[in-house]
Image (spheres, rainbow, N blue to C red):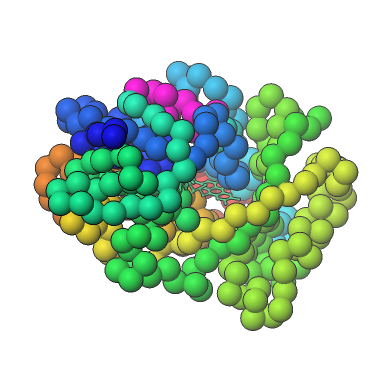
Amino acid sequence: MIYANVIIVGGGPAGSICASELKKHGYDCLILDKHEFPRNKLCAGWIQQDVFDMVGVCEQDYPHSITRLLNFNVHIGSRLIKMKMRQYAIRRTEFDAWLLYRANVRIKHHKVRKIQKDGDYYVIDGQYYCNFIVGAGGTRCPVYKSFFTKLNPRKMDLMINTLEDEIAAQNEGEECHLWFFQHKFPGYFWYVPKKEGYINVGLGGFQAKLKKKNDNLKRHWDWLVAELERLGLADRSSLNPRGHYYFLRNSADNFQQDRVYIIGDAAALATRDMGEGIAPAIKSGFLAAEAIANGHELKYNSIRKYSLPKYKLMKNMTKAFLLNRTADLT
Ligand SMILES: Cc1cc2nc3c(=O)[nH]c(=O)nc-3n(C[C@H](O)[C@H](O)[C@H](O)COP(=O)(O)OP(=O)(O)OC[C@H]3O[C@@H](n4cnc5c(N)ncnc54)[C@H](O)[C@@H]3O)c2cc1C
């Protein structure tokens, strides 16, 4: 039998932050993850300044590769709008391992299958015992499946299905490309250059809308690859996409049941406009640690629901579109 005050299922950004915060409050934490880190995580790795602010590191002190994304090429229909923004791209394989080991808590390589309650304890797979359990296992988190499917049901119309690949490539630049309202796709496409010669390309869209039209992601992936080749950004022979699904933020607000909590993608917190999930995952890790330590109910009202300031975005994009100029969103 292995015991910890708190067991956190999943060592992604949500779980790592929650563990490191709980440790500061004097809790003995154990993280269980089905993968050994560094592990691959399908994700474009696009983040904003708030992620650095929350994890308490400045850009210069982050020990791995980081790309400043200042110029965005936004393709809307046949038009190209240039946008100035100040965003960043990290590689998830590096970022997640850095956050996890920085938490400096016990970590076990274990795939969680069964969770039961036994008196005051939660028991995982008959061998791990704890008083508090935090579900940070992403979309298919076993803590969500065991305790929250009825309390916080997934909204199928907010399910985002994705295809993505991150590869070493010749192109090294700092210009990101985004495609909206293209190829009748109910979502968007991206090309994100990363430091040290990597690129991340992919697409994410509403699965319910695709299904309704009997459509599939592969057809849109083929369109993206053709577009990347046309622009000289990638070559189809090197791309081999993989898929993952996750859920955007809904209006549910049940994230705790007794001494069980869900955070990050397990709680479906990605932003409604861009599907940005790293910042909400990190913030939810902080909030869950605070709720456990202070004994108050877990709420996510302070987590932002949108990535982009809607009014500023619409005003500047419309102006740029009409005047054929660069939209400044810095
Ligand atoms: C293609 C794609 C692109 C994206 N791009 C961006 C982006 O550019 N910017 C952004 O902010 N967000 C992006 N997101 C969303 C973002 O990746 C997630 O919101 C974020 O990773 C959530 O973090 P998390 O810690 O909740 O979960 P995760 O990072 O998914 O970590 C969950 C962990 O739990 C572990 N786990 C799962 N099941 C078990 C189990 N049974 N037992 C033990 N361990 C388990 C997994 O191994 C994993 O390590 C993207 C998502 C996708 C799919």
Range of magenta residues: 94-104
Q: Quadrant of the N terminus?
A: top left
Is residue 213 located in the magenta-colored stretch of the structure? no
- Asked if 250 appears above or below 263 in the picture, the reply is below
Q: Residue 296: percent from the left, percent from the top?
A: 13, 50
Q: Is residue 221 left or right of residue 307?
A: right
Q: Find the residue positioned furthest to the left.
A: 295
Dominant SS of magenta comes to helix
Residue depicted at x 60% and y 54%: 244
- Asked if 33 appears above or below 97 in the picture, the reply is below
Given residues 17 and 29, the one toward you in this image is 29
Q: Residue 85: percent from the left, percent from the top?
A: 55, 42
Residue depicted at x 25% and y 34%: 3
Residue depicted at x 33% and y 71%: 150
Q: Is residue 256 left or right of residue 241?
A: left
Given residues 60 and 101, the one toward you in this image is 101
Res 149 → quadrant = bottom left
Question: Is residue 269 visible to the viewer in this orientation of the structure?
Answer: no
Residue depicted at x 42% and y 24%: 101
Question: Is residue 240 visible to the viewer in this orientation of the structure?
Answer: yes
Q: Residue 172: percent from the left, percent from the top?
A: 74, 30
